[in-house]
Amino acid sequence: MKPNKLILAVLAVLLIVIVVAGIRATNWFVESQEFRAPQRAAIEAPADTTPRDQGLADEHAAELESNKTLEYEPRAYRQIGGVSSRVIVWVLAQLHLLFAAFVLAVPMFALIIEFIGYKTGDSRYDKLAYEFTKLLSVSFSMTATFGAFLLFMLVLLYPQFMQYLMHVFSPTFLPYVALFFLEAAFLYSYYYGWGKFSPRVHLFLGLMLNVVGTGIMLIANAWLTFMTSPAGVSESGAVFSTWEAINNFTWMPINIHRIIANVAFGGSIAGAYAAFKFLTARTDEERAHYDWMGYIGQFVAISAFLPLPFAGYWLASEIYAFSQTLGLQMMGGAFSWLFIIQAALIGNLFLAANYYLWLGMGRVEGTTHYQKFIKYLLIAIALCFAIWATPRSIISTVSEIRAMGGSAHPMLGYLGVMSAKNTAVNILILSTFMSFLLYRRTGKRATNPMAGVLNTMQFTIFALSAAVVIFFGIYGYFVEAAVRIKFSIPQVGAVLLAMVLITIIDVFLFRKAETTSKMNWGKINPISQYVLIFIAFSFTWLMGLMGYVRAGLRQHWHVFGVIRDTSVDAFTPSLGFATKVVSVTVLIFFGLIGVVFWLASLSGRPNWQPNRKKAALS
Amino acid sequence: MKQQSNAWVMVKIVLLILGATAMYTHIGQLVPQKEVLAPTVVEIDENATPEELVDIGKSISEGKGLCLTCHTIGKTGPGLRFPDLGGIATRAATRIEGMDALTYLADSIYHPDDFIVDGFVKGMPAINKPPIGLTQDEMISVLAYLQSLGGTPTVTLELTPADLGVE
């Protein structure tokens, strides 16, 4: 057989490297063995004439004796090499939370989809729910691994602080572990028991998986919210009520906010999985299935995303209620510009979600009637995006504060107040809701005899809702703070009511509607799939950013106002640094979730067979 | 639909993710960059005059005291978050019948919920307690600064909370 030239070249290079390394090693060995005459000072010999062996033995004995009298000094902090302990814990906590959010969210909508399949008898839903659940098994292992890694790092790097948290929350540890075991039991029986139990038993397993998962989240949320808004402890940190420590100011708002955000995040990641499968699909049937799966994932994500700002406002108001200092640090102090980054992310998310819906109209022929409204929605969304991205108080130098007469810009500052922001976010939500309604109508014609009246009613409700939002937004500038702060309630109420009423009317309007064009699943511009991946990425990045503000808000406190951070990391890093850490974390997460997707897709592949290539060739 | 190779799809997905990462990281670099250090105790000369305390108090109000995060100086209108501090020393003397300006100002920073100006809500923390946690000397300096806004500073570091009637 003729030797390959490339292999020969590689071998030659390898040989040269080995020869050079051998010469260097030999040289080092010879030099290290060479005799060197001791350098002697030109003085008399030392008085100590103890033999060397005896001297060494004495030194060892003295060291042993000295070890016995060492004083124990507890360490408040440790470091690994020169790496910042905070960054290590930050990255690990975020990775753990991202996987945990996914593992908690997917069973929620998988169960609902399975239930729809059970009630309607449509096996497509059952298949879809199973496809979502396939992603859970590996993700659960990832969650547990990063959870354990995080715990070890916390104990190692922040021993004194962890001791304090154990002092406060030790009664919650055993229930947490018990729930974790139960979750593993329900998750694996739900996944591996698919089709092996009666549908009702299987649905029950799914329900219990959700109940137990939510219980775990509630306990973990108590630990972290206590650090931000401590309760149940004295000024020096002594516990007088564990329940109060759990049920602190921000516990329930975080619980609600996290459940909703987890669903939005889980839906978007599942949508990204479907997009990946769509783009690599080989048949139209596969493409149709994954297009539908992507749409459902996206529908789940956006449905949860729409009420999320309301939950966020509740959380923010509870933070203010707990401590104005904390609230103002968040919205008007060191973190004010973080919310501009957040606005950029959420603006992108809204734009991308609307774009996906508009592209989705392409699945149905003859949708130009609705597409003409898109430009108006786009203008509304862009305007709201700009207002939301305008800050109120900014980090300024003393001379800038003097020049502005305060920390707000004299003109643009008016767009940075809650009146403007509440108005912008509510109109943004209404616009996205309208996009969804338009998408829903594609390919259908209402046959309801009262279609004209119902359409007018929908338009009137929409216009009235927008008018209420804008009215209170403007009126808020002319009243005192005590009155203005209550205006968000009618604004949010008007939007929620409009969404509910318009949906109810729409259901009536399009019941038994005539299908004018068939929905062609799989017939969509592939760009839409990249939009789904972009949405999943933006959601993940947003979670990373908001995780930073939630924890960073405490600034130089481990437990705000109670346990001060005295480590070298007791400062708030710049936003530029924070966004770099978030980016690295999100990239690691996407690398790992790629592994999850790959492992999940292995189950659909044919089994390995020996000599398959030969068989195929013959 | 034209089928693309899996490798090409993966390349595009990776490019999309890297591009989005670069975009969001870049946005993070565009905003003002500031590391906020943990506040330290301001060392004040025990013989400082009221005028010297005004300068120190002003610096504390703009910095670790966080006063100007909420309060403004010389602004009017309904858009204020908390009462404007312009001319506060003059108004303080007229707020509560029989109470002098210094006592009113001292009470307002030691016990902020005692007097709420009409049209505003509670919310100011006691700035001598954590998390802001100003020392007694720093509190006196802030008082000197507040006295200077529409009045003449008179306080010195010898004053105790008992002297100010805020124990």
Image (cartoon, helix red, strand yellow):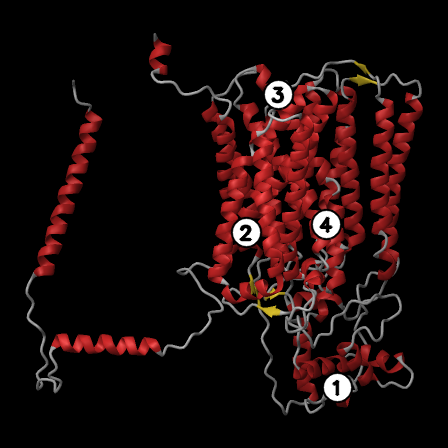
Tags 4 and 2 on a common chain: yes
Residue type beneath disc 3: His
Query: Residue A499's x, y, as percent?
Result: 83, 36
Q: Against A256, is A375 above or below?
A: above
Residue B52 placement: quadrant? bottom right
Residue beneath the point at 54% across and 40% down: A140
Q: Are marks 3 and 2 in contact (CB under 8 Å)?
A: no
Which residue has dot 4 on it?
Answer: A312
- State how far apart marks 3 and 4 are (Cα): 34 Å
Which residue has dot 1 on it?
Answer: B153
User: For the residue carrying disc 4, how many other residues have a C-alpha within 10 Å: few (<14), some (14-19), or many (20+)?
Assistant: some
Q: Are marks 4 and 2 in contact (CB under 8 Å)?
A: no
Residue type beneath disc 1: Pro
Q: Residue furthest top?
A: A618
Quadrant of the drawing holding the N terminus of chain A: top left
Q: Against A484, is B7 above or below?
A: above
Q: Secondary structure at mark 2?
A: helix
Tags 3 and 2 on a common chain: yes
User: For the residue carrying disc 2, how many other residues have a C-alpha within 10 Å: few (<14), some (14-19), or many (20+)?
Assistant: many
Residue type beneath disc 2: Ala
Which residue has dot 3 on it?
Answer: A289
Q: Secondary structure at mark 3?
A: helix
Residue beneath the point at 75% across and 51% down: A313
Which chain is indicated by disc 1?
A: B
Residue beneath the point at 68% across and 31% down: A203
- State how far apart marks 2 and 1 are (Cα): 51 Å
Which residue has dot 2 on it?
Answer: A93
